[in-house]
Image (cartoon, rainbow, N blue to C red):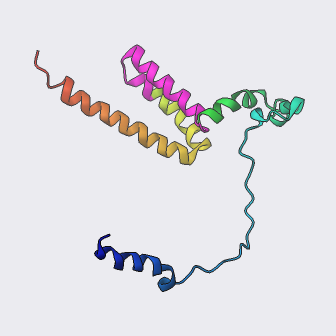
Amino acid sequence: MNVSYLPTLILLGLTPFIIGLPEVSAQTEIITVNQTTPCFMNYTAGVDMWENCGYGDDYLSAALLPWEWITGGNFSMLIVSIFITFTYIKYHKAVYPIMIGVMFLPISFFVFPDTFLSWSIIMAFVVIGILIWYVYIKQTKEY
């Protein structure tokens, strides 16, 4: 054993006593956590699952509930993004996706203000990246 390791071992062994032992603190606040299992995955509910998921009140939101859960609540924004992408792929005109985006812009911002801003920033960077690629790669080729 190397003797130079001995002071390090002693220091590491005495560190809790030098710094001080941690004091025990008492917990005084109770945090209530909501149920994280969605209603359609509650296998013990039985027939009550239909009422718990809201099929008696709103059939459309109840039918979209699993898709909203899978996409993290961004299902409608995902559908709009797919519409915009397919429209551009089919027609190759930027006017049509811009019109779709302008139509869904007020609805998306009203329903999802925080998520809309982060989603729009991501989509803007994607569009800027495609534009830079188009300018550098497509426009600089000499045929």
In-front residue for pair 60/63: 63
* Displayed quadrant of residue 85: top left
- Above or below 85: residue 115: below
In-front residue for pair 115/7: 7
Name the dominant secondary structure of the magenta segment.
Answer: helix
Based on the picture, tell me whether residue 112 belongs to the magenta stretch. Answer: no
Q: Residue at x 54, y 44 (%)?
A: 115
* Displayed quadrant of residue 3: bottom left
In the picture, measured across the screen, residue 111 lies left or right of residue 15, that is: right
In-front residue for pair 57/64: 64
Position of the N terminus by quadrant: bottom left
In the picture, measured across the screen, residue 69 lies left or right of residue 45, that is: left
Based on the picture, tell me whether residue 97 belongs to the magenta stretch. Answer: yes
Task: Single out the residue that lies furthest toward the left.
Answer: 142
**Residue 102 x %, y %:** 49, 33
**Residue 67 x %, y %:** 64, 29
Q: Residue at x 51, y 84 (%)?
A: 17
**Residue 108 x %, y %:** 56, 38
Task: Single out the residue that lies furthest toward the front.
Answer: 1
The number of numbered discs placed on residues in the rendered structure image is 0
In the picture, measured across the screen, residue 126 lies left or right of residue 55, that is: left
In-front residue for pair 45/9: 9
* Displayed quadrant of residue 55: top right
Q: Residue at x 62, y 33 (%)?
A: 70
- The region drawn magenta spans 72-98
Task: Single out the residue that lies furthest toward the right.
Answer: 47
Position of the C terminus by quadrant: top left
**Residue 113 x %, y %:** 56, 47
